[in-house]
């Protein structure tokens, strides 16, 4: 056999070996990640099996419309994925170029007479070029040369065509993949960002919150806070100026929020006019500061195409922190899994705090704070109107029963102030208490309530009901002045007239409050800590405060049956109350399910619409005479 004779492979062996080469290429291609890899796989692993001396794969460079050598076998292979002296061909140039131009395999059995032959590394005598096509377009050429004449057979042509079509498939799928990746990136953006505000959307927010919650459980962060912000009276703007203006406002407000917060805080648009922020201890600011920054960012009017508008917002905050020591001690029977951080519960708590904020207009940043809500009357008129109301005795009390959950007896009432305004009608305290606290008028209101409550108590006593007590809510301004008890109003306090104080009012002036409360207790007054659980510092202050009863805040009662955090908190409070020897009241019981849960957990007393609604003082005798029973379903 001479150098110029064809391969020694026998005729009948060939098809089998070629078929095997094609099949192994088909399967090996599946593990490749790029077209480049596919080409090298072809030249490294397949070509030798075909008995070829040399092979070069060209791809079309789309921008320059040239054939570029991309992989090689034989002399032209220099390194692992390197071609020795790569050359480029025009489409139509040489046999390879012609194959590309004609999109047909070209087989030349004797190159010695072919004037179009392009010499690459060395002169050879036969050549086979097979196009690689995609959708009828040329994308490359597989070119092989051999030093013998008549080397290539019809079998070789078929085999290279088969290999070429495999490359095509792989090329097309990787192109499809690239397109898919592009559209996935678009989809990802659509799925995570809100198109109107360009802020991350609810889905993104919840995913990030869940991640933060997991990190809390893993001990990587020590607090997770959610703020839910709702624009006040956005609907009015939408209705007045139309949706385009509403959209414009959302965009502008979103910009302000984004600019106001550091990048460490995730701010997103949940829906409509509702936004949320996620704060952990890793953020450079705390949740309350974030609330303040958000509110401050929209303080100045926003000029829209249609009008300049002034917008305010209400924010609810829910914070998950590690259990303070006092609770951990009280709850030694409970597993720490109770305190796991739950995204859903945090959202619900922040949401209910936001509604509370909307409803009662408190201008401070705790759970349930109300920020920016305008009261019923404008501030200017309000002060004058309250003064007028005080003069005309427009403030009256409604009484809401407190019920012993074991005996099902009414044990007393809470006095809740109402303002019977001659034009507006019955006004909720949520509309004016906060304002009155700021204007200082709360003292006068509290004193009216105190006097009326005392009258009621005296009436109950006269009617033989020494067992019943009446609670009054006292504000910070009274608590911080112990000497007030020496005046005529102080004289109203007697056994049976109890006070409800919130942590917030106590914290305003802790030392004075402790003195006032101690003095009240010495007169037989029982001290109730109101709205317990929604402040930050609850537990540490609780140890210092002289108190007899803890009232679990409505928002936790509302969370029972929906939020594990509420359930855990109430469970822990039951343990805490036992450890501290104080009575526990669940307020805001509205459903049978909530009632069953608090009863099941061993909460002593309850208050709420399900048990009895607040009623005018004049109605309590009729209520008591009817005989109270808990309505079971
Ligand atoms: P608070 O002391 O937490 O009073 C309980 C509030 O919850 C009352 O609202 C009561 O009507 C409401 N409530 C009772 N049961 C339920 C229930 O099942 N579900 C729900 N959602 N709510 C229930 P109200 O009367 O509007 O009083 C609101 C707040 O105004 C009071 O909250 C208290 O902080 C303040 N307030 C009321 N009266 C006075 C007062 O005489 N002096 C002072 N300083 N503050 C007062
Ligand atoms: Ca209260
Ligand atoms: Ca309360």
Image: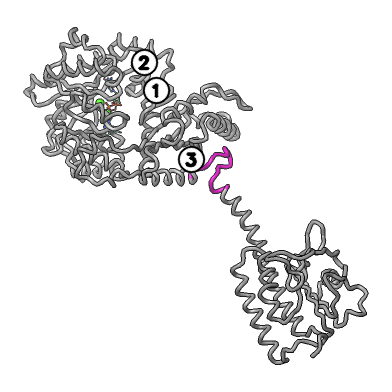
Q: What residue sits 29% from the left and 40% below the top?
A: 566
How far apart marks 1 and 3 lie (CA) works out to 23 Å
* Residue found farthest to the top: 487
Judge: label 3 CB < 8 Å from ligand 1.
Answer: no
**Residue 582 shown in magenta:** no
Residue 583 x %, y %: 16, 32
How far apart marks 2 and 1 lie (CA) works out to 10 Å
- Within the displayed image, which quadrant is ligand 1 positioned in? top left
Q: In which quadrant will I find the N terminus?
A: bottom right
Q: What residue sits 78% from the left and 59% below the top?
A: 62
Q: Which corner quadrant of the image does residue 153 belong to?
A: bottom right
Q: What residue sits 53% from the left and 23% below the top?
A: 310
Categorize mark 2 by other alpha carbons within 10 Å: few (<14), some (14-19), many (20+): few
Q: Which residue is mark 3?
A: 270
Residue 28 x %, y %: 61, 73
Q: Which residue is mark 1?
A: 363
Of residues 211 and 257, the one drawn nearer to the viewer in this rendering: 211
């Amino acid at each position: 056999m001479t150098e110029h004779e064809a391969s020694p492979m026998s005729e009948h062996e060939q098809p089998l070996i070629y078929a095997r080469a094609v099949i192994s290429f088909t399967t090996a291609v599946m593990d490749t990640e790029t077209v480049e890899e596919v080409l090298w796989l072809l030249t490294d692993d397949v070509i030798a099996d075909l008995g070829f001396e040399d092979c070069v794969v060209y791809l079309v460079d789309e921008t320059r419309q040239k054939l570029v050598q991309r992989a090689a076998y034989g002399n032209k292979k220099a390194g692992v994925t390197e071609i020795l002296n790569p050359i480029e061909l025009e489409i139509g140039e040489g046999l390879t170029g012609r194959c590309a131009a004609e999109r047909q395999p070209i087989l030349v059995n004797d190159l010695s007479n072919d004037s179009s032959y392009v010499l690459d590394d060395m002169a050879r005598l036969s050549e086979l070029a097979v196009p690689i096509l995609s959708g009828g377009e040329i994308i490359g050429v597989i070119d092989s040369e051999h030093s013998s004449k008549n080397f290539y057979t019809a079998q070789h042509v078929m085999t290279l065509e088969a290999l070429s079509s495999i490359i095509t498939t792989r090329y097309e799928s990787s192109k499809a993949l690239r397109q898919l990746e592009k559209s996935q990136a678009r989809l990802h953006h659509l799925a995570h960002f809100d198109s109107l505000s360009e802020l991350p959307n609810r889905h993104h927010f919840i995913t990030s919150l869940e991640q933060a919650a997991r990190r809390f459980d893993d001990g990587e962060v020590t607090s997770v806070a959610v703020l839910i912000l709702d624009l006040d009276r956005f609907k009015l703007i939408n209705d007045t100026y139309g949706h385009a203006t509403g959209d414009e406002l959302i965009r502008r407000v979103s910009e302000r929020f984004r600019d106001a917060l550091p990048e460490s805080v995730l701010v997103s648009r949940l829906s409509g006019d509702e936004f949320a922020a996620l704060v952990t201890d890793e953020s450079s600011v705390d949740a309350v500061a974030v609330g303040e920054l958000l509110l401050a960012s929209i303080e100045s009017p926003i000029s829209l195409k249609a009008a300049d508008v002034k917008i305010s917002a209400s924010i609810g905050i829910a914070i998950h922190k590690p259990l303070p020591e006092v609770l951990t001690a009280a709850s030694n029977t409970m597993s720490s899994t109770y305190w796991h951080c739950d995204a859903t519960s945090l959202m619900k708590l922040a949401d209910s705090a936001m509604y509370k904020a909307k409803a009662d207009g408190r201008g401070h940043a705790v759970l349930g704070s109300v920020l920016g809500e305008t009261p019923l009357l404008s501030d200017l008129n309000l002060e004058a109107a309250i003064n007028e109301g005080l003069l005309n005795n427009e403030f009256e009390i409604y009484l809401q029963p407190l019920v012993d959950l074991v005996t099902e007896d009414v044990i007393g009432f809470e006095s809740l102030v109402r303002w019977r305004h001659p034009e507006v009608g019955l006004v909720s305290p949520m509309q004016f208490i906060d304002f009155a606290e700021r204007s200082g008028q709360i003292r006068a209101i509290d004193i009216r309530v105190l006097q009326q409550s005392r009258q009621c108590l005296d009436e109950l006593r006269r009617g033989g009901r020494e067992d019943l007590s009446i609670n009054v809510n006292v504000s910070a301004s009274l608590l911080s002045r112990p000497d007030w008890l020496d005046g005529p109003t102080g004289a109203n306090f007697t056994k049976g007239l109890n006070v409800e104080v919130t942590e917030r009012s106590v914290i305003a002036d802790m030392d004075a409050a402790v003195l006032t409360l101690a003095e009240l207790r010495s007169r037989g007054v029982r001290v109730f800590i109101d709205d317990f659980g929604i402040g930050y510092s609850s537990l540490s202050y609780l140890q210092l405060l002289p108190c007899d009863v803890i009232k679990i805040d409505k928002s936790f009662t509302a969370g029972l049956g929906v939020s594990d955090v509420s359930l855990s908190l109430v469970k822990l409070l039951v343990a805490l109350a036992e450890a501290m020897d104080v009575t526990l009241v669940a307020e805001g019981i509205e459903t049978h399910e909530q009632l069953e849960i608090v009863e099941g957990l061993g909460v002593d007393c309850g208050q709420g619409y399900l048990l009895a609604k607040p009623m005018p003082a004049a109605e309590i005798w009729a209520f008591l005479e009817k005989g109270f029973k808990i309505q079971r379903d």
